[in-house]
Amino acid sequence: MKTAVRTSPGALAQAAALLRRGELVAFPTETVYGLAADAGNPRAVRRIYQVKGRPAHNPLIVHVPDVAAARRHLRHFPPAAAVLAERFWPGPLTLVLPRGAGLCREVAAGLDTVAIRVPAHRVARQLLRRVGRPLAAPSANRSGHTSPTTARHVRDELDGLIPLILDGGPCRVGLESTVLDLSGPQPVILRPGAITRAMLAGVLHQAGLADVIGDATVRKDSRPPRTLKSPGRMARHYAPRTPAYCFTAREASRAARWLRRQSAGFRAVLIGFSSAVPALTSAAPKVMRVLRWPRNPIACARRLYTILRRADAAGAQVMLVQLPPRADGLWQAITDRLKRATRELPR
Ligand code: AMP
Ligand code: MG
């Protein structure tokens, strides 16, 4: 199959026609690029799993154009959902709620809940309006790999597997949406993102609703949850192909020692914040390339996957990835993705 990369608005009609016919189209959202299929068509949705190589038990996110459409496809839309949707939609917040009419079982991997959101990207919104159907769309990458934040990234992942990639430029947020489960007695964050815990708690509190928010984000060194509620919770995810090890600023000298112990021809790519870079470049020439994380969290999130992909393409034996020095706000989501993309530095 030949994969076309086209910009909107010219390609919108073609994209909508393909989707209505049950084909897949990659499209930009403000978080990452999505791989879309008609969420009411089981055959089309199964094709997403097939193209991504995604395990059948990992549910997808459904995208709708507005709150009214979300309500139509859910059995229940609780007050907490209403206030959060009012404040954060369109935007990078996904809500898990009881699945209703018009969404096939495959979208939710058989669960009776479904993850749903209203994306903010202009092209995503135009596409949803054109198609007139809810779109199931996980990130447009092969399962477990780094998410795509440009049309070029999508082509690197899925060339020849889908007919069309809509190019809407680089994604503004750059990180997958925050996933908040509202289907239980208490809201639970299943995946941290640009809508932070503090932002969610603030809005719920102001509305006189639950301001206690659980966090199901597992640490990579803890045991996996008994029921896999959410693929974003798998310890290994978002990973580059080159073996990647993470370290903190405090571990920079240990990382440098580890590097010096490797054989003469060993080559590493370093991605770091300025603070830890000097300790490691003392292990030159084993550090063949240094890439720097932006110090501003918004810029860091936006560039995260592009920088990981660049490091991955350098042809090194390993990537050494410094974790952010802070874990609050947006840094929490950045740290979460980096921990899942890497392993701990070997002793
Ligand atoms: P992706 O589209 O690749 O970013 O992954 C989809 C995300 O949606 C997963 O990480 C899950 O957190 C979430 N998800 C989708 N459906 C459900 C559901 N019914 N219950 C819990 N989480 C879900
Ligand atoms: Mg994904």
Image (tube, rainbow, N blue to C red):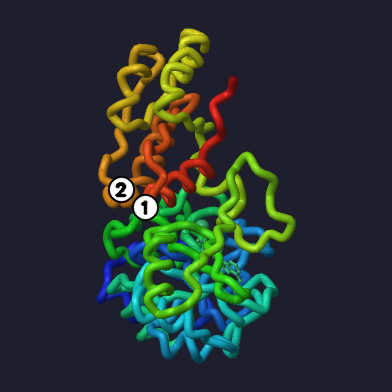
Residue 338 shows in the view: yes
Residue 330's mark? 1
Residue 18 shows in the view: no
Q: At 34% across and 81% down in the image, what residue appears?
A: 13
Given contact means CB atoms under 8 Å apart, are the residues at marks 1 and 2 in contact? yes
Mark 1 and mark 2: span between their CA atoms?
Answer: 6 Å
Q: Quadrant of the C terminus?
A: top right
Identified by mark 1, the residue type is Leu
Q: At 51% across and 10% down in the image, what residue appears?
A: 261
Of residues 59 and 17, the one drawn nearer to the viewer in this rendering:
59
Badge 2 crowding class, 10 Å Cα cut-off, few under 14, some 14 to 19, many 20 or more, is many
Does residue 111 appear left or right of residue 40 in this picture? right
Badge 1 crowding class, 10 Å Cα cut-off, few under 14, some 14 to 19, many 20 or more, is many
Most extreme residue toward the right is 226
What is the x, y in percent for residue 169? 27, 60
Residue 297's mark? 2
Of residues 107 and 202, the one drawn nearer to the viewer in this rendering:
202
Q: Name the N-terminal-most of marks 1 and 2.
A: 2
The residue carrying mark 2 has its beta carbon less than 8 Å from ligand 1: no
Q: At 63% across and 39% down in the image, what residue appears?
A: 221
Residue 98's mark? none
What is the x, y in percent for residue 304? 36, 46
Q: Label 2's element?
A: helix
